[in-house]
Amino acid sequence: MSSILRRVALMTLIMSTTVAVSMAAPYEAPKAVSTPSLDTSVLQGYSGDVNSVGVSFTINTDGSVSSVQLLNTTGNDGVDAAVLETVLKWKFTPATDSNGNPVASSKTEYIDFRN
């Protein structure tokens, strides 16, 4: 009998987790409105081996960007800071829930600065 109760409890947990995750997911993903490029003048004198950086960030309900974090570093503080400043300038149409209300969302992008 206890094995049946354990199975029921496990199924209930799985189902409630699935419902919670699906309710939290945006109905419509955010869309880029303005994503200015990295000012390439900051790359002058940069001789590192890293050709791109990953950044994760939050898109707020007003479409602004916050909580920008580098996923990897170039090894150059000036270039890293310029990447962070650039991403903070980006603007989006925010994600929306199933009722059309704006919701905050997360995004990860990779910026390639060596062509």
Image: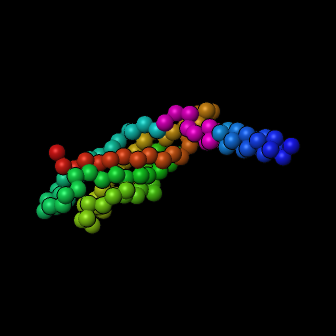
Image x and y of residue 71, in percent? 37, 56
**Residue sitting nearer the eye, 58 or 102:** 58
Res. 112 visible in picture: yes
Occupied quadrant, residue 5: top right
**Residue sitting nearer the eye, 46 or 31:** 46
Image x and y of residue 111, in percent? 29, 48
Image: 110 above or below 28: below
Which quadrant is the N terminus positioned in? top right
Occupied quadrant, residue 96: top right
Say whether residue 25 is magenta.
yes
In this figure, which colouring scheme has been used for the structure? Answer: rainbow
Res. 101 visible in picture: no
Q: Which residues are magenta?
A: 20-29
Image x and y of residue 42, in percent? 20, 59
Occupied quadrant, residue 98: top right
Residue at image location 48% in from the left, 47% down from the top: 106
Say whether residue 34 is magenta.
no
Left or right: residue 47 versus residue 61 is: left
Left or right: residue 95 versus residue 70 is: right
Image x and y of residue 62, in percent? 50, 46
Residue at image location 24% in from the left, 65% down from the top: 76
Left or right: residue 41 versus residue 18 is: left
